[in-house]
Image (tube, grey):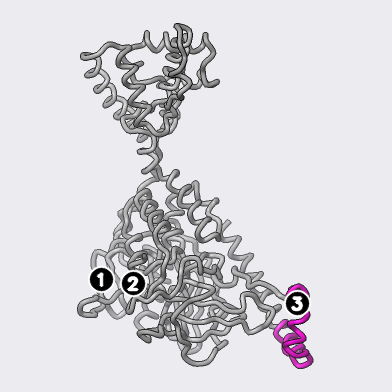
Amino acid sequence: MDEQRILEAERYQMEQIRELEFEELQVEEMDEGNSSDDDRNAVGAAAASSDEYTFNTFLAPLHTYLGEVEDTYRRLAFLDGGAILTLPLFYLEGVVLFPGAILPLRVVQHNFISAVERALTQVDAPYTIGVVHAYRDRDRGQLRFATIGTTAEIRQYRRLEDGSLNVVTRGQQRIRIRRHWTDVEGPCGEVQVIQEDLPLRAPQDAFGKLAPLCNFNGHNVSHRMHSKVSLHGHGDGDNDSEANSEESFETELSSAEKRIHQSAVSSCCGYDKMDESTSSSDDKIDSEIKYSRSHIIDSGCSSTPGEKSHKGEGSRRRSKNAGLNKFRRVPRAFWPYWVYRMYDSYCLAGRAADMWKQIVGTPSMDGLVKRPDLLSFYIASKIPVSESTRQELLEIDGISHRLQREIDLLKSFDLIRCKHCQIVIARRSDMLVMSSEGPLGAYVNPHGSVHEIMTFYKVNGLALDGEAVTEYSWFPGYAWTIADCANCEFHMGWLFTATKKQLKPQSFWAIRSAQVADDKH
């Protein structure tokens, strides 16, 4: 599906470029005979809307500015976790590559050209390079390299007349750099493929469908409770499902989930036996009901004032039966249900996807909720935070831990600040998604420098440097102008302005993630 979508987008790209060129000629002819600005304003926005069109966000990740590139038609199987191999390495400042993310390269230096050529012909992992984040030491300014990187598969490339290469790659798997060196074929290193864990899933069916803990040691009580609830008709309507045996439940679990569940049940039985020596069965049930009412969030065991106001033997019996039936929903496991949800990869993926939809909006994450591992890498590669924070996300081992950190970031990040002078450049609410891949992406300039940028429809405290240029624009139909921080004069990004009056948005800003401060208040 992914390959088919890319091929369809490439075909659509060529049609869109032809349309843009034709519309540009039409706009130039219309401008010569157009009326004054006052007349155009008098017409109103409704009349002008028929000629307006919105930028096609599927064009940005195609990197059309690189020109025609040839598809390698090589789609490699994933390398085994723990495998050790030698790969050509690319050390990139301001870039953190994640599995699944697109990375364009403009290879102009001779040693890196040799590295690409080596990757195209190597046997162990053909068409594969290693990408490592490079950064400057804050104290001495020395260039340092991260120890965790990502393999990148070369999917498209083209050799130009001057010998340079235009390359489009896609991140594949995380790697740990064991050692690195530079030889006649360029920079390379010995790397080890990181073995990724599987998504954690709590045995959710153990909560709310099985009899309480006391059933392990008090079957008569359980039978009496079930009978009374059935006779008086105070059940929840699903008593049959609640009375499922432990054996039928465990058949639905994986081997790992069975071990977790059995360990939890064993621990709970131990506590149950200790309580049995100091209290009667009825007293224990009452005390555990009270405990569950006050401590178990998802058990639904809270009583209503109406229950306490009933008088008479019949009312007390009905109240007790209802309480016992509610007690059946107490988790069998040692920890409450909400504790397991904190580490359930699928629950965390759902929360992260919902937050992304509320904060960023597009693209939709619904298709990735069932793949928490892919979702965690996708959010990490597109969340508009600093490069050091994204490197931190790349180095996290464990899907659930990575998703937890991303949820915290989505909750907390609001202000975008200059890395050098700390002035506020933009706010989270100012984000504008100009690529179908998300609000952050990597692009390369003619000199080979790769920039990861986040896009906004408005910013503060930036000053333009120079004139607008249409050549080598990352966004077809827009001209770019360098933008510096007005306070410290460091290069923060670019202003993109539409070359045609009908193209919407008319302008937007691109901020380099390498220039964004870590601290977000």
* Left or right of 482 on screen, residue 420: left
Looking at the rendered structure, the number of numbered marks drawn on it comes to: 3
Please give the range of residues in magenta. Answer: 22-51
User: Callout 3, which amino acid?
Assistant: Gly
Give the residue displayed 52% in from the left and 10% down from the top. Answer: 232
First in sequence, mark 3 or 1: give its number.
3
User: What residue is disc 1 on?
Assistant: 180
How crowded pointer 1 is (Cα within 10 Å; few <14, some 14-19, many 20+) is rated as some
Residue 508 image position (x, y, % from top left): 55, 77
User: Callout 1, which amino acid?
Assistant: His
Give the residue displayed 53% in from the left and 84% down from the top. Answer: 480
Q: Is residue 91 above or below residue 408?
A: below
Q: Can residue 116 be found in the magenta stretch?
A: no
User: Callout 2, which amino acid?
Assistant: Leu
Report, in whole angstroms, how far the alpha carbon at label 3 lies from the one at label 2. Answer: 56 Å
How crowded pointer 3 is (Cα within 10 Å; few <14, some 14-19, many 20+) is rated as few
Mark number for residue 89?
2
Residue 359 image position (x, y, % from top left): 50, 59
Give the number of the mark in front: 3 or 2.
3
First in sequence, mark 3 or 2: give its number.
3
User: What residue is disc 3 on?
Assistant: 44
Q: Quadrant of the C terminus?
A: bottom left
